[in-house]
Image: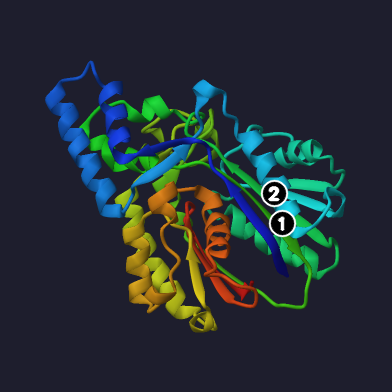
Amino acid sequence: MIIQSVTFRTPSRRIDNDELLGLLREENHDSPSDQVERYCRTVKRLLENIGAQTRYIRDKVKGERGFDLLIDAVRGCLSNAGLPPSDVDLVIYCGVGRGFLEPANAAFITNAIGMKCDNFDINEACMSWVRSLQIAYSLLATQAYSTVLLVNAEFTTHENGLSDVLRLRSHDQIDHTFPALTIGEAATATILTASDRPWRFRFKSLPRHATLCTLPLPGFNDFCNPDGRLRLNDAHRFVAFGLEMSRIAVREMVAFIRQRNEGIEDAKIWFPHNTGETMIQCVAHQVGLSEKLFAGVFRSYGNLISASIPTALALAAKDGRLSRGDRIVFCVASAGMSLALIDGVY
């Protein structure tokens, strides 16, 4: 499999930490000022500790739409690959951001670009893009398809309660709401074609930690065992116990890499899904990959969910750090909880 082209687009509204704290104060103007300032000091400290600086979200006042950004990313990806839309015979839409539970979000992208090919969706939280990569690899290997387009539109801040997330109820809510303040938005497009270059995909699932990070739908109680953590926010409200998740993810990912590290030492660049610069630096240091780590996406763009690794790929190719023939590794810890190690040649 060959990654022919990767593009990403971000919205125009850039929010740094100071503006985010300003939004917190504005949203809580009717609360006691001493409580609000204490809350802001804690949020500021946490943002600094994990290396967050800026993130981009849609400017709703200007009518900015995620779909337009995604279509632009797809057109740019096709242009960079030198391919007409008619060459694509499968579109996979992946990720958390979506406008429809049915039909497949991929159908709307396929139609907008003027393609008439097969299409479907894959949804596995932050793991969605690499899981789609695995599925595309298998389909290309069996010659079921020759050119696959992976797309995602991780636009979730407005849809999942931006104002509500900023509301102060108690200082303790930081434990499960702070990660929502680190989310950024982006659309990505990736063109894949068949080749004799082998890739390796290794996954590990830890479902006992599933309640640590959730984004429930209405009626979710009918689809799970009772758990108090699932009732902390309403439907369509992101809940994540960031500190506990980070501790578990670091421990489990380090162990996973050490158990399944065949060939990783030969990689030129290691691309992690990044939910915090500090956490991923900790993992890289423990497994001896610090010099190969591609960092900075989270610092500049926030947690881009399933768009984080394709965004990193596009940035690395643009700045010349990534070249054709380089061996690369993708490393993901995702809600669920699930882990992934993928390596191949770019």
Left or right, 28 with reference to 306: left
- Is residue 339 shown above or below 110? below
Image quadrant in which the C terminus is located: bottom right
Indicate the position of residue 288 as horizontal and vertical percent values. Answer: 37, 79
Label placed on residue 128:
none
Q: Residue at x 20, y 34 (%)?
A: 39
Q: Is residue 227 visible?
A: no
Residue under label 2, please give it. 76
Which amino acid type corresponds to the residue marked 1 in the rendered image? Asn
160, 312: nearer the viewer: 312
Q: Residue at x 78, y 46 (%)?
A: 119
Which amino acid type corresponds to the residue marked 2 in the rendered image? Gly
Q: Please tell me how crowded label 2 is: few (under 14), some (14-19), or many (20+) other residues with Cα within 10 Å.
A: some
331, 241: nearer the viewer: 331
Q: Please tell me how crowded label 1 is: few (under 14), some (14-19), or many (20+) other residues with Cα within 10 Å.
A: some
Q: Secondary structure at mark 1?
A: helix
Q: Residue at x 53, y 79 (%)?
A: 267
- Is residue 19 shown above or below 200? above
- Spatial CA distance of label 1 from label 2 is 6 Å
Tell me whether the residue at label 1 lies in contact with that at label 2, contact meaning CB atoms closer than 8 angstroms. Answer: yes
Indicate the position of residue 185 as horizontal and vertical percent values. Answer: 50, 41
